[in-house]
Each structure stands twice: as C-alpha cells, then as structure tokens.
Image (cartoon, rainbow, N blue to C red):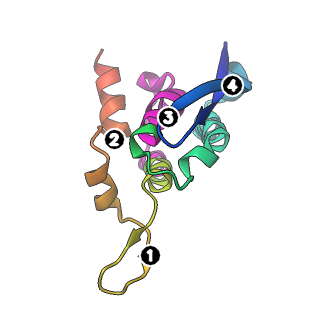
Amino acid sequence: MWIHLYTVHCSSSNITGWTVFHSLNKSKFYSGRNFRSRLKPGNACYHSVQNLLSSNLRLKNLKIWIYRTIILPVVLYRCETWSLTLREERKLRVFENKMLRRIFGPKKDDIIREWRKLHNMELNGLYSSPNFFRVIKSRRMR
C-alpha cells in the first residue's frame, strides 16, 4: 500500500493545482512495532508540505485543511490498535503542537512588543478540532 504526498499550488486566494510530490510505501514505515516507526510517515508528510505550512500567506483555513487531510490520516493510520504509554502520548502531543505552531505562527506580545511562540492552551483555543487522543479513543470504540 502506498501513500502519495502532494504539493499544493496556490495563489493568494485559492488552490490552483496539485502535483504528486513523493510516494511512500506504507509497509516500509509501519513494519516496526516501536513508536518511532509510527511517527516517521507523519514527519515525512510534514516535511513535504512544510513550505506551505510556514508560508506568510494568511490562509489559516487552507493550512488547517492540509494538516487534516494530508498529515493527520498518515499519523493516525491504524491508531485503533495502538497501546500508548505516557511517554508516547507526550510525543504525540509534541508532534501535534509542532504542527499547530507551524500553522498559526508566532504571536506579537502587546506588553513586551516582541514575537513569541503560542502556548499550548492558546493553540488548543485556536484549533477547534479534537486532539489526537480523542480521535484515537473514538476510533477504538468503533
């Protein structure tokens, strides 16, 4: 089974086209039972769309859509069979926050008048969808 990574061609207001960026063999990444092998394809997807997620375009909805449709399905592939330890949950949380910080970018602090990274609570407030763990729990219950 193959994962096809796409690059998105977009102008300032809309998507103008798609191109196959890279194809990954799922069995190559998901063969191991360790947790690192679960995050490898997610990192590969992230690096394939990294330029779009970190661009200065103010299309946050497009960036969230790319995250939900390209990166999340790859990271959460077969998540209903995972048994997660606290360390693995923390690594997933770090991965998710890394993606969201890339999407929403820095925030200008009004008091200090400097740019800073968004805190985790601010990220959760901006991103209205459920986090990884709710998605995993809901898929387990199916």
Per the model, the C-alpha gap separating discs 3 and 4 is 14 Å
At horizontal 30% and vertical 51% (from top left) the residue drawn is 126
Q: Secondary structure at mark 3?
A: helix
Per the model, the C-alpha gap separating discs 1 and 4 is 34 Å
CB under 8 Å between callouts 2 and 1? no
Judging by the rendered image, the residue that carries numbered circle 2 is: 131
Residue 70 to residue 90: above or below: above
Q: Residues within 10 Å of mark 4 (few under 14, many from 20)?
A: few
Q: Residues within 10 Å of mark 3 (few under 14, many from 20)?
A: many
Percent position of residue 124, x then y: 30, 52
Query: What's the mark number on residue 66?
Result: 3
- Quick one: which residue is furthest to the bottom in this view? 112
Judging by the rendered image, the residue that carries numbered circle 4 is: 19
Q: Amino acid at mark 2?
A: Asn
Residue 69 to residue 56: above or below: above
Classified by dominant secondary structure, the portion drawn in magenta counts as helix
Q: Earlier in the sequence, mark 2 or mark 1?
A: 1
Q: Amino acid at mark 3?
A: Ile
